[in-house]
Amino acid sequence: MNQAAVKAYFEDPRVIAYYAAAVKGSGLWLSEEKIFRRIFHPRQELLELGCGVGRIAVGLYEMGFTNLMATDLCPRMVRECRRVLGLLQYEIPTQVVDATRIPFPDNSYDGVIFGFNGLMQIPGAVARQQAVREVFRVLRPGHFFVFTTHDRDHYKFKDYWKKEALRWRKGEHQTGLLEFGDMYNDTDLGKLFIHVPNMQEIIALLKGAGFLVESNVLRSKLANEPLKVREFADDCRFWIALKPS
C-alpha cells in the first residue's frame, strides 16, 4: 500500500463526481458546524487539508468563514473544487498540497481541519505522524486542529477486528497492508484504503507531535445527522487537539 494507490482512487472520475454531489447533497454536517462554531472564529485564517471538491470549505464560507485555504493531495480533486467554487462565485484559494510536506511557513494558521477521515487515508504510521507534525508546525500556538477517524473499538466493529487480529497473528491478513488497522477493500467506486485506529493510537499520535488532546466525541453523540449525511458517511470520531501557547 502506498500513496500512489490512494491517489488512484481519489482521481477516479466516479469518485470525484461522488464528492462533487456531496457539496450540496449532504453539505456541511451538523456535527461539523457545532465544532467549527465552538473552536474557530470567522475572522481566523483556516487551512483545510484533504478538501476534496470543497464540501467543508463551501460550508465554512457560507457560515462566514472567508479566510480559508482549501488543499488536497490530488490535482484532479483540486481542479474540480476550483470549478465548483467558480460556479458558486466563492473566493476561496485552493492548492495541491501533500499533508506530509505542507508548503507554508511556521505558525501560519489559526486553525487546521482534516475532514472526513482524510488523515487516516495516509498509508503508514510514520507518514501519518509526519503529517500531524506538519500540522503542528503551521498552526499558531493556542489554536486548534480538528479531524475525524473511524474507531476500531466501536462496538459495531469489535467482532471484525477481533477476527482481523487473529488473521494478523497467523500471518493470514490481506497482502499489501502495512499494519494492523489497515483496510483496503472494494467499494462501489473502486478500491479504497483507510487506516482504522483505536483511541490510544490517536492520543499517542497527537502527543508525539506536541499537541494536547482537548476533546474527542463520536459524531452520533454530537448530532442527529440527516439521512443524506448518514448515507454519505458512517459514524466517526471527532478529535480536537490544541497546540499549547
Image (spheres, rainbow, N blue to C red):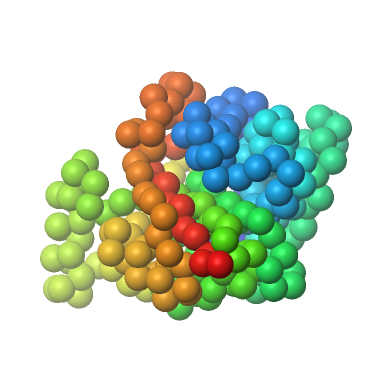
Q: Quadrant for residue 63, please give it.
A: top right
- Residue plotted at (59% across, 25% down): 25
Give coordinates of residue 54: x percent, y percent: 68, 41
Vertically, is 151 above or below 131? above
Classify residue 178 as left or right of residue 79: left
In the displayed structure, would residue 14 be above or below residue 177?
above
Q: Nearer the viewer, residue 241 or 234?
A: 241
> Is residue 141 left or right of 90 when viewed as pictured?
left
- Please state which of residues 61 and 226 is positioned toward the viewer in this rendering: 61
Residue in view at x 55 percent, y 56 percent: 144
Q: Quadrant location of the C terminus?
A: bottom right
Position of residue 41 measured from the top left corner of the image (x, y, whole percent): 65, 42
Residue lying at the far front in this picture: please name it. Answer: 245
Camera sees residue 76: no
The answer to whether any part of residue 153 appears in the image is yes
| Residue 222, picture quadrant | top left
Q: Residue at x 41, y 55 (%)?
A: 214
